[in-house]
Amino acid sequence: MSNDAATATSATAVDGAQTERHPDAPAHGLGASLPPADARAKTEGTFPYASDLWAEGLLWAAVLRSPHAHARIVAIDTSAATGMPGVRAVVTHQDVPGDPSHGRSVVDRPVFASDVVRHHGEAIAAVAADHPDTARLAAAAIAVEFEVLEPVTDPEQAFAAEPLHPDGNLIRHIPLRFGDPDAAGEVIVEGLYRIGRQDPAPIGAEAGLAVPRPDGGVEIYTASTDPHTDRDRAAACFGLEQERVKVVVTGVPGATGDREDGSFQIPLGLLALRTGCPVKLAATREESFLGHAHRHPTLLRYRHHADAEGRLVKVEAQILLDAGAYADASSESLAAAVSFACGPYVVPHAFIEGWAVRTNNPPSGHVRGEGALQVCAAYEGQMDKLAAKLGLDPAELRLRNVLATGDLLPTGQTVTCPAPVAELLRAVRDYPLPTLPKDTPQDDWLLPGGPEGAGEPSAVRRGVGYAVGMVHMLGAEGADEVSTATVKVHDGVATVICAAVETGQGFTTLARQIVQDVLGVDEVHVAPVDTDQPPAGAATHGRHTWVSGGAVERAAKMVRTQLLQPLAHKFGMSTELLQIADGKITSYDGVLSTTVTEAMDGKELWATAQCRPHPTEPLDDAGQGDAFVGLAFCAIRAIVDVDIELGSIRVVEMAVAQDVGRVLNPAQLATRIEAGVTQGVGAALTENLRTPRGLVRHPDLTHYALPTSLDAPDIRIVSLVEERDVVAPFGAKPASAVPVVTSPAAIASAVRAATGRPVNRLPIRPQAAVATPSA
């Protein structure tokens, strides 16, 4: 990665020029590079993750999972397991006292399979024992008689196949209609694109601890990203009132959607309630791959119409999402895919058909940029085809069509937020190109294949590609986005109480910065999260920067008013004439000067506030509606070296320009962007969870090829456009999802430029990058 990434983030794009932030940037508060409070503990290995939990009288859990992608369960015999020494309980579908099913948005997924298994790895039973090895042996001893059925693994076949679920195979269909169906352009390009199944691949696998309560309830300690939803689902399955189930969030080892699966948490609670003992589950890497949701594999067919100047006239597309066995977040992902199918471009006429269907493949769900990543790869492939057919520079073609504030999305929604897409694209286009390998022969090892690579330097071609991407902020289609926060101040120390989970996105650091900025209190603590606090919602789509950060700011401002009103009244002035900075309160005229601690006079001040953005609405039967609160944009120029004989690819550099609204923490922002780009590199080149006939092949980190530090390119953050969104608290936009969405499309574009090949599949296979020497 680039060594100057943090420095680059200190620059703000103003009319295309770079202006440096003042060297006397604040040491704390908004705009400062405040380090995370847990950074030291994480680097020293003392941070308490869920897998580190312990309790007196602890039992260990193991889950029996289906070895088949599709099978009828004829019989389950648990006698061998229950008779093993050390086994304390075995539970199956018959032991679920409440709702037998759970689900994120649609309650369609059984806690334990009863009559049929619908995907490889589906939970069938769970065991609690006094030793983890005993628990695993007991789970393996459960005898299940299967009648193996033919799996439906091709989503195109799901339409005509027998129903795989009582709710049918079609989860959602969105037909988007915008403009004149008879409109046509002078130039037409078509394409078929396939996007693979990317796994979140968390470094820390799922783990948790369930502890029974004296009132007959249970407490679940786990790395949840949405504890209140998890509690509500679990309580329904346990047949308990919500107040008798508590979810306590432990340290989350990063999350991109993979912590939202109740199939790990609910069996834990059932076993704790059955045994009356604490029960712990630490998933193996194989269980992790089999249990959590993945990115939706997607099939996309596109037809773009343009005039002779390259301006888009009409986009037609068919988008098919493979949801796997259960609905999960497929409806929301499809809405994003259909709505953003044309990209951040002005398209007068658009006709998009989108479907999400059930198959016997592993379930798909929330992974950064769901829906948006898949269509970005496709519409940018189309833009490259269009540029080639018209003989135009790819960046210039894009600039002729980019979206701006005031334009319409194909959903009919007006873009009211800042949309500096043209500025972003120009910034990456005009950034200097890196040197060629032939100019620095000592860097031969950087060629595709690395040191001792099999290829010849003469076979290497360099390609430059572009992509622009977009994501929506917060939930969509009428989701009630709300968060609650409390701020308390006593003896010069502030405490923030908010159920927003820190998943690595930096919310706890942001909360500290907000309180420092508003109250001038340097020492700020963020309380641990549990469901005794008011809900804050899921840690997705940049929600917590907006709604939870907004709630913290409002609560802090209410405390500020409580603090300043007595002083203002005493001196006969308005509180607006008083300011707080560096722990001191001063008046505009200098008459009043005191410290925050002196003004507190030993009192404890506190306030609770909510933040709820303006409402949205579901898409109608024609795919129309104001479905999104706001949008964020990114442009990336990718430079790749391709060995056109071997098909090996090295990403040399990624130049990133991003619409961030406002930089709240420069160092943290740089980290988020770099991480997002690197995750996109994995989606572009290596990450594809293979599932022949629905069976997960090699569910481990040895065969699932994650990009390492050696695979990460130089990431140059060349411009951060700080055009504040007036409806967002602080004017900031989410940072990490949009580079994930954009980078795979940019890499594919660069490989097309290097090879002359169409590159219509992600991840890019070596054979797709092989070209003739003249390419």
Image: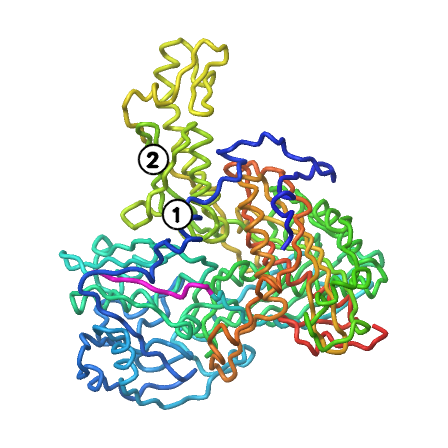
Where is residue 56, by image quadrant? bottom left
User: Tell me, what colour scheme is on the image?
Assistant: rainbow
Side (left or right) of 86 relative to 447: left
Q: Which mark is residue 608?
A: 2
In this rendering, the answer to whether 139 lies above or below 660 is below
Q: Is residue 208 magenta?
A: yes
Q: Mark 1 — residue?
A: 500
Q: Residue at x 75, y 68 (%)?
A: 752
In this rendering, the answer to whether 438 lies above or below 516 is below
Kindly identify the amino acid type of the residue bearing the numbered disc 2: Thr
**Local SS, label 2:** strand
Where is residue 558, by image quadrant? top left
The reply to whether callout 2 and callout 1 are in contact (CB within 8 Å) is no
Q: Is residue 158 magenta?
A: no
On-image quarter of the N terminus: bottom right
Side (left or right) of 400 relative to 597: right
Side (left or right) of 532 relative to 446: left
On-image quarter of the C terminus: bottom right
In this rendering, the answer to whether 132 lies above or below 730 is below
Disc 2 packing (10 Å; few <14; some 14–19; many ≥20): some
Side (left or right) of 449 relative to 353: right
- The magenta-colored residue range is 202-211
Q: Nearer the viewer, residue 504 or 150?
A: 504
Kindly identify the amino acid type of the residue bearing the numbered disc 1: Ala
The first of marks 2 and 1 along the sequence is: 1
Pair 2/1: label in front: 1
Q: Residue at x 31, y 63 (%)?
A: 208
Where is residue 461, by image quadrant? bottom right
Picture coordinates of residue 444 (x, y %)? 74, 67
Residue furthest front as drawn: 442
Q: Give the Cα distance between marks 2 and 1.
A: 14 Å
